[in-house]
Image: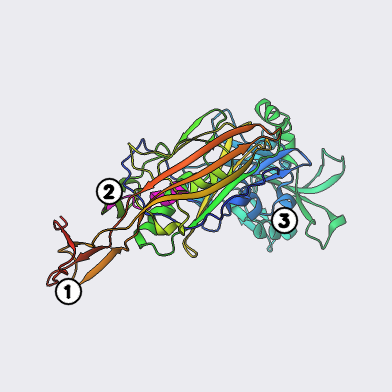
Amino acid sequence: MNYRLRALVFAMAALLTLVIAQPRMTARTAPANADPSQAFAYFSETSHNLGFDFKRFYTEHGGIDIFGLPLTEPFLDANDVQVQYFERARFELRPDLPEAFRVTLSHVGRLATEGRADSAFAWQQGASAADRRFFPEAGHSLGGAFRWFWQQHGGLAVFGYPISEEFTEINPNDGQPYLVQYFERARFEYHPEHRGTDYEVMLGQLGRQLLERDPRAQAAAAPAHPITLLGEATTSYATSASERYHNIARAVAMFDGVMVPANTEFSFNAVGDFSEANGFVDGYAIVGGQLERVVGGGLCQVSTTLFRAVSNAGLQITRRQGHTFIVYFYENILGFDATVYTPSVDFRWFNDSLGPTYIAAASDPATARVTFAIWGYDDGRSVTYEGPYTRNWTQPGSPVWQYDAALPAGAVRQLVHGRPGVDVNYIRTVTLPDGQTLHNDNFYTHYHPWEDFYLYGPDVEPPDDVTILPPKQ
């Protein structure tokens, strides 16, 4: 990859602001251990990409040894279901289903044997031998090496029920006879020449056979360029409250797998519904210069991490607003954050790359880290930064205290440790391989000074030299 990002070591997270509901979308729940920097793989043997849910399923269930190489890019079939063909299978994506069922194998076994009346496909009343497992739901049994392979590689959830007994069939790929058995989603082949190895049982190449019948699949089989990692960023939220942990994970899952077409502007606020009805909880956020409990607290952690990944990818930033105050979650990397507050404050960027870009995102509660990665077609652009340049430092005033009747008697809780105000500039330059400057951005942020902020409960007398706010409602 040609990206030589002399990027800042961006880490750490942000306080988040209130987000009001946008048009509803179904949120995804990305696996906690998903690595956005490994969201795609490219198979040069067939010139096709494999990413996101399809890649996870492929990897977790045996990869190339089980399914073979990808033969197409993902595409929508006649029923508007996203599918992808492989040598030995066809994957289907069902984004509205729970994680365990989001990716399934198409019924290639049934499709390939439709109309066959061979005796091996006749409904059986029971197992032909005591050591075979009979499936009364399907009228067929399973035993020997085929039964072992079925159990070891996903069983019913992956391959479905057997729809035939074992029988000998000529393999259309090499013209040789093999002992086979058909399942709803596969054809098992016994290869005696590989006895005692992992390849004693293999799946037949039903994906390749069915591709030849599918015009849409044939169009998607055209060689594709590699989808590569364009830029990424990670922040940490280790000192956050539990509400932020929850909201960050919920929001990150909504962004993982989002595709942004070429020549399209992306809006953070338009991704989905960040309301309580969609699983978000209330937490502290900066509203009107004060800390308030609002639904969606934690979203600026997500918007800031995404902003940094997009910036590192060299894409065009069209709308970005910094925080009102310095947020120490960001490891004092001043001036490189992006706040959101629906509907008035949004983070937006424009995909000016060669093709679609993909957002890969994951949060890991165990390490309290959020990672965003931007994937797409590499045109060789590079990114450099200058700064931060700071000026007009202003120290905070006297501490601020506010009464909160919900606190226990005698309790005092410090929510904000005072910090100065400052003007900050970052200069980003994006350059094409021919030396042409594509983008030259001045990311400017004016941080206001922020005083120490305390909540206090009943039976507490604030110090004399502080500012007292009206009680919390």
Colour scheme: rainbow
Q: Nearer the viewer, residue 394 or 241?
A: 394
Say if 70 sits above or below 458 in the image: above
Q: Which quadrant, please, contains the C terminus?
A: bottom left
Point out the tag, 1 or 3, that comes first from the N-terminus.
3
Would you identify the image quadrant in which residue 117 lies? top right
At 48% across and 65% down in the image, what residue appears? 366
Q: Residues within 10 Å of mark 1 (few under 14, many from 20)?
A: few
Are discs 1 and 3 less than 8 Å apart at CB? no
Q: Amino acid at mark 3?
A: Phe
Residue 22's spot in the image, x, y percent?
35, 37
Q: Secondary structure at mark 3?
A: helix
Asked if one can make out residue 161 in the rendered structure from this viewpoint, the answer is: no
Specify the label residue 410 is tagged with. Answer: 1
Are discs 2 and 3 less than 8 Å apart at CB? no
Tag in front: 1 or 3 = 1
State the extent of the magenta-drawn residues as a range.
Answer: 293-304
Tag in front: 2 or 3 = 2
Q: Which quadrant, please, contains the N terminus?
A: top right
At 50% across and 64% down in the image, what residue appears? 367
Q: Nearer the viewer, residue 246 or 144?
A: 246
Q: Amino acid at mark 1?
A: Gly
Q: Which residue is mark 3?
A: 146
Say if 333 sits above or below 74 in the image: below
Point out the tag, 2 or 1, that comes first from the N-terminus.
2
Left/right placement of residue 425 relative to residue 128 reads left
Residue 449's spot in the image, x, y percent?
32, 54
Q: Which residue is mark 2?
A: 287
